[in-house]
């Protein structure tokens, strides 16, 4: 299962060209084939480099996964670079059609969330982070997740004790937003029942933290 060929648009960027800027709207992800790309963001008026990417790396996917969101960082070609531009619909179709990728995406998403917050000198809120991650997965068709794999990914990404993550999941279960089930292989599952409730809960927590 792969991306449709007509979804590919190969672009070449000269050295120091801006691929996308922080704050701009994004509906495409990028796959770096040749060259190097710097990912950075402004923190307290200064540029902070988050990563230097080499082939083969994907970047810019968070704007797709977060929905109608602005870019959270700036991507600049450090040398002549070739990237494949992947449209939102192609990326979403690929995710929906590739169940084996779901748990891997959980790991990637929480890692990106943690990296963006920690390197921006902000401590990630665990409850908010869990809600955001589960909402992202549900929005793209992943509403049935392996409990242990997801717990391990969240625990590692946020660098917290598993009991802390389990407490968040238990709270969401008590509110009926998620449910814990056991499949035919006797493996525990996290089933997301109310995607919008996750989004609303995360938004409420963010607002409370800012007040």
Image: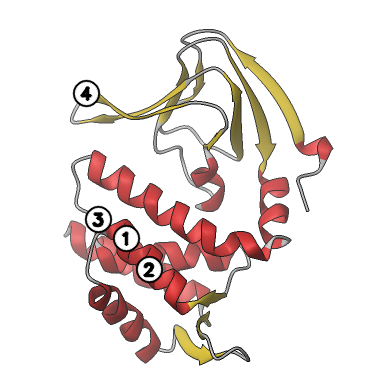
CB under 8 Å between callouts 1 and 2?
Answer: yes
157 to 59, vertically: above or below: below
Label 2 and label 4: CA atoms lie apart by: 34 Å
Q: State left or right for residue 129 relative to residue 4.
A: left
Residue 119 on image: x %, y %: 25, 39
* Viewer-side label of 2, 3: 2
Q: Secondary structure at mark 1?
A: helix
Residue 146 on image: x %, y %: 51, 76
Q: Residue at x 39, y 56 (%)?
A: 110
User: Mark 2 or mark 4: which comes first in sequence?
Assistant: 4
Which disc is residue 156 wearing? 1
Label 4 and label 3: CA atoms lie apart by: 20 Å
Label 3 and label 1: CA atoms lie apart by: 13 Å
> Quadrant of the image for the C terminus?
bottom left
Disc 2 target residue: 152
Disc 4 target residue: 46
42 to 169, vertically: above or below: above
User: Mark 3 or mark 1: which comes first in sequence?
Assistant: 3
Q: State left or right for residue 32 relative to residue 51.
A: right
Residue 182 on image: x %, y %: 53, 91
CB under 8 Å between callouts 2 and 4?
Answer: no
* Viewer-side label of 3, 1: 1
Residue 55 quadrant: top right
Q: Residue at x 21, y 23 (%)?
A: 46
Disc 3 target residue: 124
Label 1 and label 2: CA atoms lie apart by: 6 Å
User: Mark 4 or mark 3: which comes first in sequence?
Assistant: 4
CB under 8 Å between callouts 2 and 3?
Answer: no
């Amino acid at each position: 299962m792969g991306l449709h060929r007509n979804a590919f648009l190969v672009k070449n960027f000269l050295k120091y060209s801006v691929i996308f800027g922080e704050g701009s709207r994004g509906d495409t992800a990028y796959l770096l084939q040749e060259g190097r790309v710097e990912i950075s963001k402004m923190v307290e008026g200064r540029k902070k480099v988050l990563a230097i990417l080499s082939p083969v790396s994907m970047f810019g996917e968070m704007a797709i996964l977060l929905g109608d969101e602005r870019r959270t960082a700036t991507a600049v070609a450090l040398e002549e670079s070739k990237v494949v531009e992947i449209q939102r619909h192609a990326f979403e179709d690929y995710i929906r059609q590739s169940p084996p990728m779901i748990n891997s995406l959980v790991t990637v998403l929480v890692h990106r969330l943690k990296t963006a917050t920690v390197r921006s000198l902000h401590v990630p809120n665990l409850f908010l982070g869990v809600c955001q991650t589960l909402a992202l997965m549900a929005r793209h068709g992943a509403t049935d997740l392996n409990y242990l794999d997801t717990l391990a990914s969240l625990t590692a990404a946020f660098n917290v004790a598993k009991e802390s993550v389990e407490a968040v999941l238990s709270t969401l279960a008590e509110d009926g937003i998620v449910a814990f089930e056991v499949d035919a292989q006797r493996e525990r599952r996290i089933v997301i029942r109310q995607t919008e409730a996750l989004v609303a809960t995360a938004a409420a927590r963010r607002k409370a933290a800012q007040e």
